Image (tube, rainbow, N blue to C red):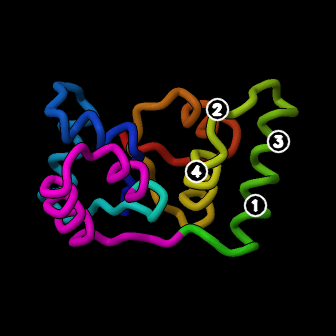
Amino acid sequence: MVIADTSVWVDFLRGAQAPYCDRMALLLDDQTIALCDRVLQEVLQGVRNDREFRTLSTRLLALPCFNLGGHTLALAAAQNYRRMRRLGVTPRSATDVLIATFCIEEGHELLHNDRDFDFMAAHLGLKVAA
C-alpha cells in the first residue's frame, strides 16, 4: 500500500501537472493508495466551503485511512526525530516524522513532494513511491 502525503494531495486536488500527481492518479485507479488520519485532517482543514468539505471528505473516506497514534508509534517517531537532529537536520514538521515512522514501521511506501521525507528516506529507511 502507498500512503500519500498532504503535499501530494494538495497539488493533485488543484490539478497540478507533476509526475507525483500522475502517479497518484494511477494509484487511485489501481486502488492501492491510502491516507492516514493526520493527512486527512491537513487536507480537509484547507477546504474553503462546506459543500466542498462534504464532497471531498466523502471521497477521501472511501479510501483506506490509517489511524496514527498510540505510545509505541509516538516513541519511535520521537527517536527518529532525535536521530535526524543528531545527523544535523531538524525536521520542519513533527507530523511528517510521525507519518514517515508509521510507513517505516508498517512497510508502506510514501508518495510525497516534501524535501524532509527525502532525508528520512536516506537515513531512516523510509520507502518512497517512485
Q: Quadrant of the N terminus?
A: bottom left
Say what amino acid the circle numbered 2 marks.
Answer: Arg
Which residue lies at the image location 16% right of the left edge and 25% below the top edge?
17
| Amino acid at pointer 3 | Arg
Between the residue at mark 1 and the residue at mark 3, the CA separation in whole angstroms equals: 10 Å
- To which residue does mark 3 refer? 83
The local crowd at label 3, few if under 14, some if 14 to 19, many if 20 or more residues have their Cα within 10 Å, is some
> Looking at the rendering, which quadrant does residue 19 occupy?
top left
As helix, strand or loop, the secondary structure at mark 2 comes to: loop
Magenta span: 40-67
Label 1 and label 2: CA atoms lie apart by 17 Å
Residue matched to label 1:
76
Location of residue 80 with respect to 86 vertically, above or below: below
Mark 1 lies on a secondary structure that is helix
Q: In the rendered view, would you say 112 is above or below 65? A: above
| Residue type, label 4 | Ala
The residue lying at 18 percent from left, 34 percent from top is 14
Single out the residue that lies furthest toward the right.
86
Q: What element carries label 4?
A: helix
Left or right? Give the position of 88 relative to 8.
Answer: right
Contact between marks 1 and 4 (CB within 8 A): the answer is no
Measuring from the top left, give residue 72's x and y in whole percent.
74, 72
Residue position for label 4: 100
Q: Comparing marks 1 and 2, which lies closer to the viewer? A: 2
The residue under label 2 is 92
